[in-house]
Image (tube, rainbow, N blue to C red):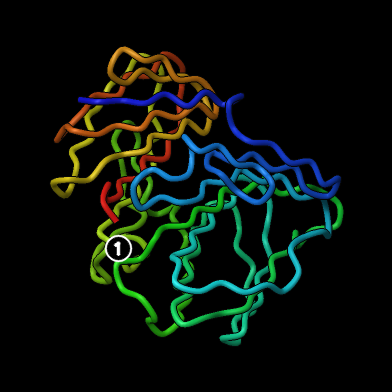
């Protein structure tokens, strides 16, 4: 098993007043040649948006865009005619494909929102743009990974145009579990949302991450109650 450790405080930072952003990979004004992507994972942004503020209408194409609110409600509007509110405990996916415009705003004027937004390179270009949003509360399992995204429309969770899987893990202190990779040649970017966990003898705290390759399975041990996002993606794109 090969690993690469990304400490939380090694991420890029941007403070726009209304937006405080942390970038796991090179984004906007922050560029690190050693942190451009992890396989098909191009962007992992950890954003805090002040009440009533947000991103005005802007374009995307040929990218799979996934949004997971950790706290608060995000209002989304796009050129496909979707007007939705994505809430804590939900996941949204948008296949930009041939091109789409969208805006994203904090729905609430009186409190901030914290969200993760991820961009995945697709395995098909110029597909018809597509939008989906589902709650993930009902998928929750304690002390074992539960799937929230896959390549298959028939599987649990949302789906994207890529041989990728996302799992959430809610692991109690002193508990351990295993993650089994779904496809040969894939890697996993394990991102600690809260708590403290250990993978391959590496201790991971809040917002630390570990890129894991060249293995079919690995163990995760919680030193404290921990919540992780496990992002499995092809390493060659």
Q: Name the element at disc 1.
A: loop
In this image, 6 relative to 54: left or right?
Answer: left
Question: Which residue does the image show at 69% across and 47% down from the upper left?
Answer: 29
204, above or below 212, in the image: above
The C terminus sits in image quarter: bottom left
154, above or below 73, in the image: below
Number of numbered markers = 1
The N terminus sits in image quarter: top left
In this image, 194 relative to 124: left or right?
Answer: right
* Residue 165 coordinates in the image, percent (x, y): 30, 52
Q: Which residue is mark 1?
A: 162
* Res 151 quadrant in image: bottom left
**Residue at the front extreme, as displayed:** 33
* Residue 197 coordinates in the image, percent (x, y): 40, 20
In this image, 115 relative to 160: left or right?
Answer: right
Question: Which residue does the image show at 52% across and 46% down from the upper left?
Answer: 44
* Res 228 quadrant in image: top left
Question: Which residue does the image show at 85% across and 57% down from the upper left?
Answer: 109
Mark 1 is surrounded, within 10 Å at the Cα level, by few (under 14), some (14 to 19) or many (20 or more) other residues, namely some
169, above or below 137, in the image: above
Q: Nearer the viewer, residue 154 or 80?
A: 80
* Residue 15 coordinates in the image, percent (x, y): 79, 41
Question: Which residue does the image show at 64% across and 68% down from the upper left?
Answer: 85
* Res 8 quadrant in image: top right
82, above or below 56, in the image: below
């Amino acid at each position: 098993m090969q690993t690469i450790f990304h400490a939380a405080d090694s991420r890029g930072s941007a403070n726009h007043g209304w937006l405080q952003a942390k970038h796991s990979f090179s984004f906007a004004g922050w560029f690190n040649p050693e942190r451009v992507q992890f396989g098909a994972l191009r962007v992992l942004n950890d954003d805090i948006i002040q009440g009533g503020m947000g991103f005005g209408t802007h374009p995307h194409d040929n990218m799979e865009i996934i949004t997971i609110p950790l706290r608060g409600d995000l209002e989304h509007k796009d050129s496909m005619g979707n007007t939705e509110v994505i809430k804590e405990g939900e996941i949204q996916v948008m296949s930009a494909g041939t091109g789409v415009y969208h805006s994203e705003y904090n729905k609430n004027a009186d409190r901030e929102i914290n969200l993760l937004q991820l961009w995945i390179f697709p395995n098909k270009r110029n597909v018809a743009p597509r939008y989906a949003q589902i709650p993930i509360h009902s998928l929750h399992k304690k002390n074992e990974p539960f799937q929230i995204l896959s390549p298959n429309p028939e599987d649990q969770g949302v789906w994207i145009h890529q041989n990728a899987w996302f799992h959430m893990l809610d692991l109690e202190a002193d508990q351990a579990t295993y993650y089994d990779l779904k496809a040969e040649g894939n890697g996993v970017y394990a991102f600690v949302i809260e708590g403290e966990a250990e993978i391959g003898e590496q201790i991971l705290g809040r917002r630390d991450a570990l890129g894991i390759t060249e293995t079919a399975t690995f163990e995760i041990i919680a030193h404290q109650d921990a919540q992780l996002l496990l992002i499995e993606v092809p390493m060659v794109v």
